[in-house]
Amino acid sequence: MAKEKVDLRKEAESKMETLVEQHNELAGQIQEANARLGEVKQMIIEHQGYIKGLEACDINCEEKK
């Protein structure tokens, strides 16, 4: 049986490509998650304003009674 010649450089380059792909995929996921996080944060702020408006309306309605 002939032993296969191991090409350490090719193995290392292949491993590097895999790692770079994983890095890029994770970086993309983080960017998407950060964008979604910003959207949800904005919705929370808007909803807090809505709730404060409802509370102000309740106070005004009680004062008019």
Image: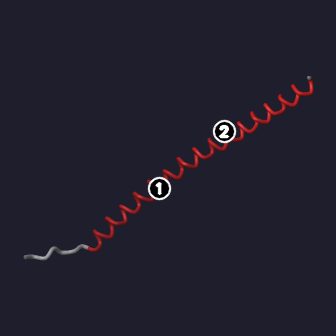
Q: Is residue 63 above or below residue 36?
A: above
Residue 5 placement: quadrant: bottom left
Q: Residue at x 13, y 76 (%)?
A: 3
Q: Position of residue 1 (x, y in %)?
A: 7, 76
Q: Position of residue 39 (x, y in %)?
A: 62, 41
Q: Position of residue 24 (x, y in %)?
A: 45, 56
Q: Residue at x 29, y 69 (%)?
A: 11
Secondary element type, mark 1: helix
Q: Residue furthest front?
A: 65
Count of numbered circles in the view: 2
Residue 55 placement: quadrant: top right
Q: Residue at x 76, y 36 (%)?
A: 49
Q: Is residue 8 left or right of residue 27?
A: left
Q: Residue at x 45, y 59 (%)?
A: 23
Q: Please tell me whether mark 2 or mark 1 is closer to you in this view.
A: 2
Q: Quarter holding the C terminus?
A: top right
User: How far, Cα to Cα, is label 2 from label 1?
Assistant: 25 Å
Secondary element type, mark 2: helix
The residue where tag 2 is placed is 43
Q: Residue furthest top?
A: 65
The residue where tag 1 is placed is 26
In this rendered view, identify the residue nearer to me: 55 or 15.
55
Is the residue marked by circle 1 packed among few (<14), some (14-19), or many (20+) residues within 10 Å? few
Q: Is residue 15 left or right of residue 41?
A: left
Mark 2 touches mark 1? (CB < 8 Å):
no
Q: Amino acid at mark 1?
A: Leu
Q: Is residue 27 above or below residue 43?
A: below
